[in-house]
Amino acid sequence: MITVRALTKRFGEKIAVDQLTFTVPPGTVTGFLGPNGAGKSTTMRMLLGLDRPTSGTALLDGKRYAELRWPLRTVGALLDAKAVHPGRSAAKHLLAMARSNDIPDRRVDEVLATVGLSDVAGKRAGQFSLGMAQRLGIAGALLGDPAVLLFDEPVNGLDPDGVRWVRQLIRSLAAEGRTILVSSHLMSEMQLTADHLLVIGKGRLLADAPLTELLASGAVVRVRCADRGDCARLAAHLPGARVEGDSVLVVDASVESIGDLAFELGIRLHGLSEEQASLEQAYMELTADAVEYGADSARKAGVR
Ligand SMILES: Nc1ncnc2c1ncn2[C@@H]1O[C@H](COP(=O)(O)OP(=O)(O)OP(=O)(O)O)[C@@H](O)[C@H]1O
């Protein structure tokens, strides 16, 4: 279980994480989603004792990282796959980690087999491709058989086979009852991996909901008008409605209420249907104001 309470991190004037509160229960994959610079890595670093919170708490199974006698046996993490001594072999690297946490040496061979690196155990980590380095990082995370696992952008830079492998591994680790927090800036990736989503923007929590609920919240009613000119007239009566060609798109409204409204206004309709917005759309809407260097902020700043 991960418990984060009013967690805040300032770097000088900049607030990277702002009063973040959430819990991550065991047995499910929780996606930690937000645009670049949203504060995902900083939150994970505070959970791992690598950054000190300005205020608030970040707990792993009820304890701060610094209170854990053998941290690798409670929490495994993949943060920066390339942060490995380049001259050390994969096996030596893992052996050093194991011994520092009183983990039996045999775990090294076990985790190397789990991630498919047994054949290159003696090869220097500096010669590893990004995909291999990522697998080595995951082996290190699994070494202490921890109940809590943190993965920061685990599929970044992987080929399609690697991506599929990481996804399956993460799902199976959750099925074993572990607590899994996995960050990404890609909704499409989270849609395939996570059961539950924490969405953050500019350090603040924007959504904490099951994937299915976020999908439902993106429902849109599409109204096709027989006469295009009527679209604008209908949209004017519906807050938040948007005209798109011969259609009006409306969020948070029922087909019945829109049908009745069109009837009252004497507008002929050629179509009235409920559509599921893609998760990508729901995410874009949630984070529209929270993107640090997105197209939108560039536009607001007058950049073309
Ligand atoms: N050591 C630091 N000193 C100053 N500012 C920092 C530091 N670390 C992070 N930040 C700032 O804090 C904010 C959050 O960064 P963070 O890396 O946590 O975001 P993120 O959601 O992980 O983004 P990304 O997907 O780009 O890694 C950013 O604006 C970043 O520039």
Image (cartoon, helix red, strand yellow):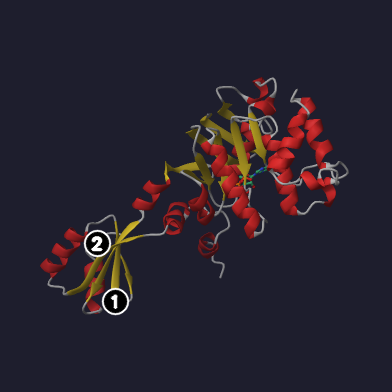
Q: Position of residue 182 (x, y in %)?
A: 57, 43
Which image quarter: residue 279?
Answer: bottom left
Q: Is residue 177 left or right of residue 85?
A: left
Left or right position of 268 against 3: left
Residue 194 appears at what percent x and percent y? 50, 46
Marks 2,1: beta carbons within 8 A: no
Using the image as rendered, state which of residue 267 and residue 276 is in the foreground. Answer: 276
Task: Identify the residue at horizontal 62%, vertical 42% (top origin).
Answer: 151
The residue at which mark 2 appears reads as 238
Give the structural element (helix, strand or loop) at label 2: loop
Quarter, ligand 1: top right
Q: Is residue 255 visible?
A: yes
Labelled disc at residue 82 = none
Question: Which residue is located at x 79 percent, y 42 percent?
Answer: 84
Q: Which residue is mark 1?
A: 246
Residue 152, position as x, y percentages in the image: 63, 44
